Image: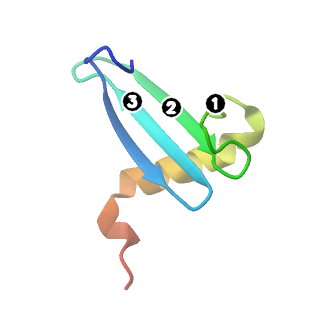
Amino acid sequence: IRGQGQGMGHSIRTDRYRLTEWTVPGKDFTSVELYDYQADPEERANLAEKAEHAKTVQDLRTRLHAGWRAALPR
């Protein structure tokens, strides 16, 4: 998707992780990238498909879809 001009990415960044969800408007396509900045600050290994990171991916996707207003202090 990157560099092809077709996809749209939305990201969430924590102190440790960056998750990006890629979609293609009008198509049934989603791709996810997850990088761990403690272990891999240069983003060389996408961890999104690794079973041991499934909970992190799900948690960050939930936060991403909740939007920035959900992250504001109450």
The residue that disc 1 covers is 44
Q: Which amino acid does the dot numbered 2 rest on?
A: Val
Give SS at disc 3: strand
Looking at the image, which residue sits at the far front?
Answer: 42
The residue that disc 3 covers is 22
Q: How far apart in space, not on screen, are marks 1 and 3 (Cα)?
A: 18 Å
Mark 2 neighbour class, 10 Å CA radius: few under 14, some 14 to 19, many 20 or more: some
- Disc 2 + disc 3, Cβ < 8 Å: yes
Looking at the image, which residue sits at the far right?
Answer: 52
Marked residue nearer the N-terminal end (2 or 1): 2
Which of 71 and 41 lies nearest the eye of the viewer? 41
Q: Which amino acid does the dot numbered 1 rest on?
A: Arg
The mark closer to the camera, 2 or 1, is 1
Position of 31 compared to 51: left or right?
A: left
The residue that disc 2 covers is 32
Residue in the image at 67% along x and 47% along y: 55
Q: Which percent across, then down, holds residue 59?
A: 57, 53
Q: Quadrant of residue 20?
A: top left
The mark closer to the camera, 1 or 3, is 1
Q: Which percent across, then down, holds residue 27?
A: 28, 17
Which of 3 and 22 lies nearest the eye of the viewer? 3
Q: Which percent across, then down, holds residue 2?
A: 38, 21
Residue in the image at 30% along x and 68% along y: 69
Q: Which amino acid does the dot numbered 3 rest on?
A: Trp
Position of 13 compared to 72: left or right?
A: right
Which of 13 and 73 lies nearest the eye of the viewer? 13
Marked residue nearer the N-terminal end (2 or 3): 3
